[in-house]
Image (tube, helix red, strand yellow):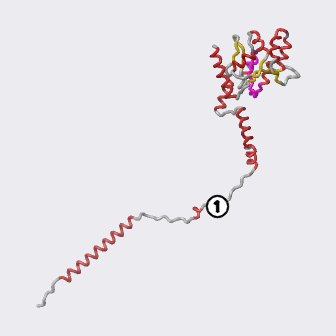
């Protein structure tokens, strides 16, 4: 079962790598509910998370998640100690804390630009994650960490990008960086500012030539007529010669 689980996790990780540009070290945003479940199931998050994701990880949380555990009392004291060991990322609610579920979803924004994995047991967070494309979900079930399969929103987003209907944020950023490196953006702006000058084109030399008159009629019929006329003239000339020759060759009759 462990090998099958790792194969599924590897397939899901590759999906996010190739389609949403996830890279190591993977940033994992954790809340108090995940730490409490790990404590109950005796799971060492720092040890097991890199093995399961097969790469380096950065475990992090927010001020709002820590404040929420403080207000809940002694029952979640152990989860609070675990959560305090992780990196604390700045959120927009430092002065006025909000519930951890609301804070985590605000960190993801609309497209998860910082490429967070979210580790939680909160149903409100998981429901909100499925509406954001490119947001992997981690949870604990049966004493093991599980990486959820991609949501339908993520699959639809990838399909739209492949069909050319959308351009992913990562692709947009790579296009901008490439343009800046090559200086194409400045050239495009200069070209747009300039007005094209029309070149003076010389007249086409072929159009200046005199048109040749087309020869009308076929050449063969008049040739045939001349040949027939010459034959007739020759035949008449021969006949005249033969008639004159007969008159000269006849013998003279003597007078009596």
**Which residue is located at x 17 percent, y 82 percent?**
250
Was residue 112 drawn as part of the magenta stretch in this picture? yes
Judged left or right of residue 162, residue 88 is: right
Q: Nearer the viewer, residue 167 or 256?
A: 167
Q: In this view, does 71 lie above or below 10?
A: above
The location of residue 54, given as percent across then percent down, is: 69, 21
Q: In which quarter of the image is the N terminus?
A: top right
Residue 177: image quadrant is top right
The location of residue 203, given as percent across then percent down, is: 62, 61
**Which residue is located at x 71 percent, y 25 percent?**
134
SS under mark 1: loop
Residue 110: image quadrant is top right
Q: Is residue 21 among what the camera can see?
A: yes
Count neighbours of disc 1 (C-alpha within 10 A) and say few if under 14, some if 14 to 19, many if 20 or more: few
Was residue 103 drawn as part of the magenta stretch in this picture? no
**Which residue is located at x 28 percent, y 76 percent?**
237
Q: Mark 1 points at which residue?
A: 202
The location of residue 9, given as percent across then percent down, is: 66, 20
The location of residue 239, given as percent across then percent down, is: 25, 76
User: What's the magenta region?
Assistant: 108-127
Q: Which of 148 and 181 is in front in this view?
A: 181
């Amino acid at each position: 079962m462990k090998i099958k689980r790792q194969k599924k996790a590897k397939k899901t990780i590759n999906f996010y790598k190739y389609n949403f540009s996830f890279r190591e070290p993977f940033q994992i945003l954790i809340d108090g509910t995940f730490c409490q479940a790990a404590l109950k199931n005796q799971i060492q998050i720092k040890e097991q998370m890199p093995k399961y994701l097969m790469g380096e990880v950065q475990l992090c949380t927010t001020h709002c998640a820590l404040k929420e555990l403080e207000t809940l009392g002694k029952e979640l004291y152990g989860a609070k100690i675990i959560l305090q060991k992780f990196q604390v990322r700045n959120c927009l609610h430092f002065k006025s804390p909000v519930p951890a579920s609301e804070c985590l979803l605000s960190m993801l924004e609309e497209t998860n630009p910082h490429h967070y994995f979210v580790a939680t047991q909160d149903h409100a967070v998981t429901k909100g994650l499925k509406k954001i494309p490119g947001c992997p979900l981690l949870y604990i079930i049966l004493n093991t960490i599980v990486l959820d399969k991609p949501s339908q929103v993520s699959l639809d987003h990838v399909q739209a990008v492949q069909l050319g209907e959308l351009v992913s944020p990562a692709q947009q950023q790579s296009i901008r960086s490439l343009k800046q490196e090559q200086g194409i953006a400045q050239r495009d702006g200069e070209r747009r500012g300039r007005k094209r000058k029309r070149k003076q084109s010389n007249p086409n030399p072929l159009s200046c030539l005199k048109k040749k008159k087309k020869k009308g009629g076929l050449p063969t019929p008049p040739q045939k007529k001349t040949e027939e006329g010459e034959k007739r003239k020759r035949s008449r000339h021969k006949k005249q010669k033969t008639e004159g020759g007969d008159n000269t060759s006849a013998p003279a009759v003597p007078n009596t």
